[in-house]
Image (cartoon, rainbow, N blue to C red):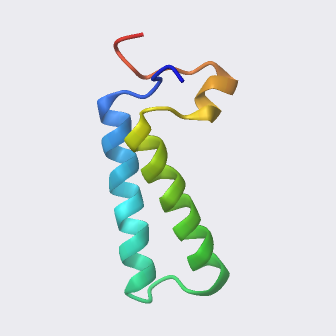
């Protein structure tokens, strides 16, 4: 896997993931929407940590400056 995510992209994804987790555990989003939010948060967190997004590969996007 070649890195295709830049630092800003990774930071935004981690921030969005953290917000979704807080919203779920505070009871702001519940039910099916809450579960979907947690899944999205998990995907965002994992892709941020490994600096690789499979969707970016499919659409040919690369935000990593080291390309």
Farthest-out residue, front: 1
Q: Going by the image, does 62 lie left or right of 32?
A: left
Vertical placement of residue 29 versus 56, above or below = below
> Residue 66: percent from the left, percent from the top?
35, 12
Q: Going by the image, does 51 lie left or right of 58?
A: left
Name the residue located 48 percent from the left edge and 50 percent from the top edge: 44
Farthest-out residue, top: 67
> Residue 47: percent from the left, percent from the top?
48, 42
Quarter of the image where the N terminus is located: top right
Quarter of the image where the C terminus is located: top left
Vertical placement of residue 64 versus 26, above or below = above
Name the residue located 67 percent from the left edge and 80 percent from the top edge: 32
33 or 2: nearer the viewer: 2
3 or 8: nearer the viewer: 3
> Residue 52: percent from the left, percent from the top?
49, 32
Where residue 59 sits, quadrant-wise, is top right
């Amino acid at each position: 896997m070649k890195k295709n995510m830049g630092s800003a992209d990774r930071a935004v994804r981690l921030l969005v993931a953290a917000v979704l987790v807080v919203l779920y555990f505070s009871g702001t989003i519940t039910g099916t929407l809450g579960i979907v939010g947690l899944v999205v948060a998990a995907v965002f967190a994992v892709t941020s940590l490994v600096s690789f997004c499979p969707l970016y590969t499919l659409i040919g996007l690369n935000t990593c400056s080291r390309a």
